[in-house]
């Protein structure tokens, strides 16, 4: 039996378990299980790996996408450049466990906005965590200028939420929420930006997929903005993670 799962905190918002369980059923895979592993700290990861020696793959969600980097033995090129990962593959070679990290968030996000490639489009990225790093990597790949908004800016190219004014909103027509603000169960929360300056020229993109329409998207829609939630990105990054898991472990499909 091959064991897969997701690590994060909280996990009550996550659709990953259902997604992969449905994947196992659809492909008639009977030698795999998927579980939620709620961790209080990323320091608990080694304990988890010892407790479940049959673990071969993990998805990683908030708040561990950056901190988990110090617990892997190898990184794929994207994860290394981004500085965050969301997928872990665990293998045993000559009785030695090898943990490799991947980032499937960046290519998944890039696929969802590829059609927006426009030399005049600029993006305002709300949040500065692991998801934001993947988003910025993708934006750079398709030459979309971007500015990061952080509660605690640590880089010159970052600003605070208090810095956002009418001019900034009017200059950045793609606004992307990469933070967990507004995620289930905090349905009434939204990033603190001046929504009164949002117009029908804007696109508001929320990486959150639960709920499907966050308060952030609702407020944007009230001002005529086009809105996109994170469901397509979730599905695309999960499919990319599945390719890593299934190719590495040659999961058996039973044709009954």
Image (cartoon, rainbow, N blue to C red):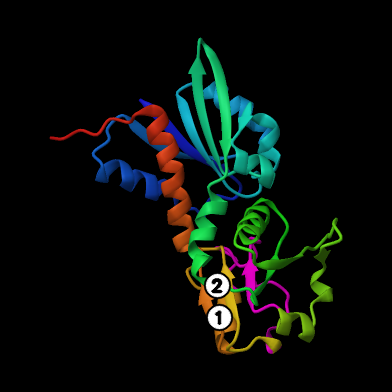
**Range shown magenta:** 172-196
Q: Tell whether position 181 is magenta.
A: yes
Q: Quadrant of residue 169?
A: bottom right
Q: Are marks 2 and 1 in contact (CB under 8 Å)?
A: yes
Q: Is residue 245 above or below residue 22?
A: above
Q: Position of residue 240 (x, y in %)?
A: 45, 46
Q: For the C terminus, which image quadrant?
A: top left
Q: Residue furthest front?
A: 119
Q: Position of residue 236 (x, y in %)?
A: 44, 54
Q: Is residue 243 above or below residue 174?
A: above
Q: Residue at x 38, y 35 (%)?
A: 246
Q: Residue furthest top?
A: 94
Query: Which is nearer the eye, 12 or 131?
Result: 131
Q: Is residue 159 left or right of residue 25?
A: right
Q: For the N terminus, which image quadrant?
A: top left
Instruction: Identify the main secondary structure in magenta.
Output: loop
Q: Is residue 52 visible?
A: no
Could you tell me which secondary element the residue under label 2 belongs to? loop
Q: Residue at x 68, y 84 (%)?
A: 195
Q: Residues within 10 Å of mark 1 (few under 14, many from 20)?
A: some
Q: Which mark is residue 214?
A: 2
Q: Residue at x 55, y 84 (%)?
A: 221
Q: Position of residue 207 (x, y in %)?
A: 56, 63
Q: Is residue 195 visible?
A: yes
Q: Tell whether position 30 is magenta.
A: no
Q: Is residue 130 above or below residue 142?
A: above
Q: Residue at x 57, y 27 (%)?
A: 99
Q: Quadrant of residue 197?
A: bottom right
Q: Which mark is residue 218?
A: 1
Q: CA distance from mark 2 to mark 1?
A: 6 Å
Q: Position of residue 148 (x, y in %)?
A: 75, 64
């Amino acid at each position: 039996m091959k064991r897969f799962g997701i690590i994060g905190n909280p996990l009550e918002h996550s659709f990953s378990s259902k997604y992969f369980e449905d994947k196992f059923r659809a492909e008639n895979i009977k030698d795999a299980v998927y579980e939620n592993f709620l961790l209080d700290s990323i320091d608990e990861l080694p304990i988890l790996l010892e407790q479940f020696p049959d673990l071969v793959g993990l998805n990683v969600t908030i708040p561990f996408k950056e901190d988990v980097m110090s617990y892997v033995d190898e990184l794929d090129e994207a994860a290394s450049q981004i500085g965050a990962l969301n997928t872990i593959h665990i293998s045993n070679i000559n009785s030695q466990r090898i943990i490799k990290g991947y980032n499937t968030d960046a290519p998944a996000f890039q696929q969802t906005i590829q059609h927006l490639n426009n030399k005049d489009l600029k993006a305002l990225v709300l949040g500065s965590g692991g998801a934001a790093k993947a988003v910025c990597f993708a934006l750079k790949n398709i030459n979309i200028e971007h500015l990061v908004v952080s509660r605690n800016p640590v880089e010159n190219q970052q600003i605070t939420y208090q810095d956002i004014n009418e001019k900034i909103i009017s200059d950045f027509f793609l606004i992307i929420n990469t933070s967990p603000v507004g995620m289930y169960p905090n349905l009434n929360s939204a990033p603190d930006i001046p929504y009164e300056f949002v117009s029908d020229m804007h696109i508001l993109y929320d990486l959150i997929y639960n709920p499907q329409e966050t308060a952030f998207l609702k407020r944007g829609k009230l001002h005529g903005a086009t809105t996109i939630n994170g469901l397509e990105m979730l599905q695309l990054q999960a499919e990319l993670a599945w390719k890593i898991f299934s190719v590495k472990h040659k999961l058996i499909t039973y044709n009954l």
